[in-house]
Image (cartoon, coloured by chain):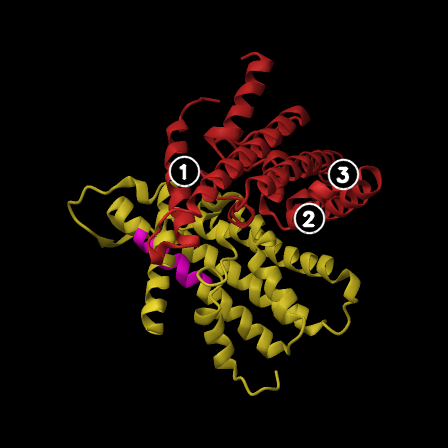
């Protein structure tokens, strides 16, 4: 299999076949929390893409150049990765505030939320630490592969959250039975979307 | 707490009135993902309860020594240490379950339910109350996982398998596989909240 083709498969697999929200149930809090309006959901999607890519890069470097050579990765990876992510988010917030105020205004409010967004830790762990299943195979990703996987996951999250926000804006004005108003109808909608995404199952064979 | 609430009240609060999943809707991700089988629910529930109780107790013990500005990183490190214990123990003793739960065990660190209890309760209350609060929230979480796991596994596969033994079987029944698949989780959880809403509006009238 040629390199670019493999990269393409990893990207597609991460984005739609194993979609992070609908197929794997990661990052449901921002999914239900900020999907009320299309505009905020776009801001959230952009911030997640940004933070996730940075986090995977730093965690990959930490794993391959610090934790693995010292043979401490197996029992230190959880605290190390979560601290890297928390510090990174703080740092990005300060840098953005200084360097690009418009970007900070667009992303600022989402950044603290992202620290506790399980998607960032999940993707960093899966893409970096060997032994976790990703795209139904467990092999060790190189840095470019890990980055392509991360970007695929983040775009998959972004597309779904924006689509869901569009649906929810329409739902606001629809006559929903009383007991289903609010959260329940959102879950029903997610179930239907998830059903649609099941159509991608077994699409590719990595 | 000095306002006369007993430990039993704290426990009930965690299980029923402030149920993390059904009422506060935190910690949803792991609940929806692992509730496809009763057995997964049992292990995930026990793991999360262990982390909740231990981190609540430790944070409550050292609450007067934690500087206010860096409290969140300290909580996260404490929680991460207990999650590491769970991670290594499960990998050693129940490797098959560990494989199935996969990334969800390290993800207990970022379960908002646990950090919310640390910040909102354990950092302000006495050790005994913090322990019972953690236990209550953990039991409430586990119960919802078990109910969801029971409904999904029974309808989706026609029987309940627990530790390689069939507990309940529906006999010759062609199971709708969708319940153990991904949409089933959203469907069953949505219906649970809808029924709860209905029950509460009925009670009010």
Q: Which residue is mark 1?
A: A194
User: In the rendered image, which quarter contains the N terminus of chain B?
Assistant: bottom right
Q: Is residue A154 magenta?
A: no
Residue A106 at what x, y percent from top left? Answer: 70, 41
Q: Kindly report the distance in space between the C-alpha atoms of the residues bearing marks 1 and 2.
A: 28 Å
Residue A40 at what x, y percent from top left? Answer: 60, 43
Check the residue under mark 1 and report the chain it is in. Answer: A
Nearest the viewer among A99 and B134 is A99
User: In the rendered image, which quarter contains the C terminus of chain B?
Assistant: bottom left
Q: Which residue is mark 2?
A: A109
Instruction: Please give the range of residues in magenta.
Output: B141-151
Q: Is residue B142 magenta?
A: yes
Chain A: what color? red
Residue B38 showing in the rendered view: no
Q: Which residue is mark 3?
A: A102
Q: Kindly report the distance in space between the C-alpha atoms of the residues bearing marks 2 and 3.
A: 12 Å
* Mark 3 or 1, closer to the camera: 3
Nearest the viewer among B67 and A78 is B67
Chain B: what color? yellow
Check the residue under mark 2 and report the chain it is in. Answer: A
Q: Kindly report the distance in space between the C-alpha atoms of the residues bearing marks 3 and 1.
A: 35 Å
* Mark 1 or 2, closer to the camera: 2
Residue at 49%, 70% (x, y): give it: B14
């Amino acid at each position: 299999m040629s390199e670019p083709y493999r990269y393409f498969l990893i990207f597609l697999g991460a984005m739609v076949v194993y979609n992070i929200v609908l197929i794997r149930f990661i990052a449901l809090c921002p999914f239900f929390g900020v999907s009320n309006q299309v505009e905020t959901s776009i801001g959230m999607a952009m911030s997640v893409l940004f933070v996730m890519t940075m986090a995977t890069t730093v965690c990959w470097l930490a794993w391959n150049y610090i934790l693995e050579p010292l043979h401490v990765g197996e029992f230190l990876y959880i605290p190390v990765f979560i601290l890297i992510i928390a510090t990174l988010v703080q740092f990005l917030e300060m840098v953005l505030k200084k360097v690009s105020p418009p970007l900070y205004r667009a992303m600022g409010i989402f950044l603290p939320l992202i620290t506790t967004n399980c998607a960032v830790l999940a993707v960093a762990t899966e893409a970096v630490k060997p032994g976790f299943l990703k795209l139904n195979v467990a092999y060790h990703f190189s840095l470019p592969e890990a980055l392509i996987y991360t970007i695929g996951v983040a775009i998959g999250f972004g597309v779904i959250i924006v689509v869901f926000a569009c649906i929810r804006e329409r739902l606001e004005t629809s006559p929903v039975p009383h007991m289903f108003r609010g959260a329940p109808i959102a879950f029903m909608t997610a179930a239907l979307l998830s059903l649609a995404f099941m159509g991608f199952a077994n699409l590719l064979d990595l | 707490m000095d306002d006369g609430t007993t430990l039993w009240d704290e426990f009930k609060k965690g299980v029923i009135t402030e149920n993390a999943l059904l009422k506060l809707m935190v910690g949803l991700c792991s609940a929806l993902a692992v509730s496809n089988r009763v057995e997964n629910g049992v292990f995930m529930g026990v793991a999360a309860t262990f982390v909740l109780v231990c981190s609540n107790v430790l944070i409550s013990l050292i609450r007067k020594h934690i500087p206010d500005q860096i409290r969140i990183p300290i909580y996260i490190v404490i929680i991460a240490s207990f999650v590491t214990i769970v991670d290594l123990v499960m990998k050693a003793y129940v490797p098959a379950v560990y494989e199935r739960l996969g990334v969800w065990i390290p993800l207990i660190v970022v379960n908002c339910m646990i950090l919310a209890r640390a910040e909102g309760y354990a950092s302000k209350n006495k050790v005994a109350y913090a322990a019972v609060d953690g236990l209550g929230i953990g039991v409430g979480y586990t119960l919802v996982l078990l109910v969801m796991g029971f409904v999904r596994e029974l309808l989706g596969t026609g029987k309940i398998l627990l530790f390689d033994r069939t507990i309940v079987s529906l006999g010759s029944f062609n199971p709708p596989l969708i319940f153990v698949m991904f949409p089933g989780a959203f469907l069953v959880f949505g219906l649970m909240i809808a029924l709860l809403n209905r029950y509460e509006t009925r009670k009010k009238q």
